[in-house]
Amino acid sequence: MIPYIQSTPYTTAASSLLTILHHLKGIPLTKEQEFNIWKKTVNLPTRAASIYALASYAHKEGLTPKVVVEKKEYDFPDYRFYKYTKEDIDHASFIADLHLRNAKNNNIQIEEQEITINHIKNELENDKILILRLNTKPIRNEKRNTSNYVVVHGYSNQYYHIVDPLVGGIS
């Protein structure tokens, strides 16, 4: 899998999806594609993408995505640390609800359940490619916890095969 390295700090999710679309559909790895995905999946006024909008975009490109979340409702508890206001988060929540409704209208399978390491391994054993939102501090050697989307496309010999749009392929 060829990684697409994100061109901005806020296109991690778009870059993750672009990596998968290139791998499965041959979509070109370009900044134009990265921004096209981002603008169609973002929860404005934040710059973060919606997992439901990412699934809808993947569906539009001919994939059959499944979304697994622990909670369907939009949540950004640390918004103050990112200089967003409560009003900003209310607007982002409204947009997130629109993305969720659109995903449902596209018949995207959405499951609400606890996500465990066994669930992830099981999906990978079934040759699924995952976009996971996780704390990337340990893999990026960052000073603070940060939540980002990465691609996980395999598990073997006790190692996960990950594409982090900031650093590339890692195990």
Image (cartoon, rainbow, N blue to C red):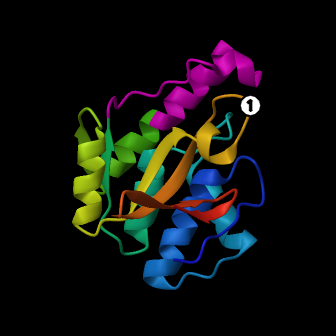
Few, some or many residues within 10 Å of mark 1 (<14, 14–19, 20+): few
Residue 135 appears in which quarter of the rendering?
top right
The residue at the point 51 percent across, 27 percent down is 93
Q: How many numbered marks are there? A: 1
Indicate left or right for 138 with 85 as reference. Answer: left
User: Which is nearer the eye, 126 or 34?
Assistant: 126
Residue placed furthest toward the front: 157
Residue 106, horizontal then vertical, whole percent: 31, 57
Indicate left or right for 154 with 137 as reference. Answer: left
Residue 84 visible? The answer is no
The residue at the point 25 percent across, 57 percent down is 123
* Residue type beneath disc 1: Lys
Q: Is residue 54 magenta?
A: no
Residue 61, horizontal then vertical, whole percent: 43, 73
Q: Is residue 130 above or below residue 10?
A: below
Indicate left or right for 17 with 138 as reference. Answer: left
* Residue extent of the magenta highlight: 70-96
Q: Which residue is mark 1?
A: 143
User: Which is nearer the eye, 58 or 68?
Assistant: 68
The residue at the point 49 percent across, 43 percent down is 133
Residue 165, horizontal then vertical, whole percent: 64, 59
Q: Is residue 72 magenta?
A: yes
Label 1 secondary element: loop
Residue 81 visible? The answer is yes
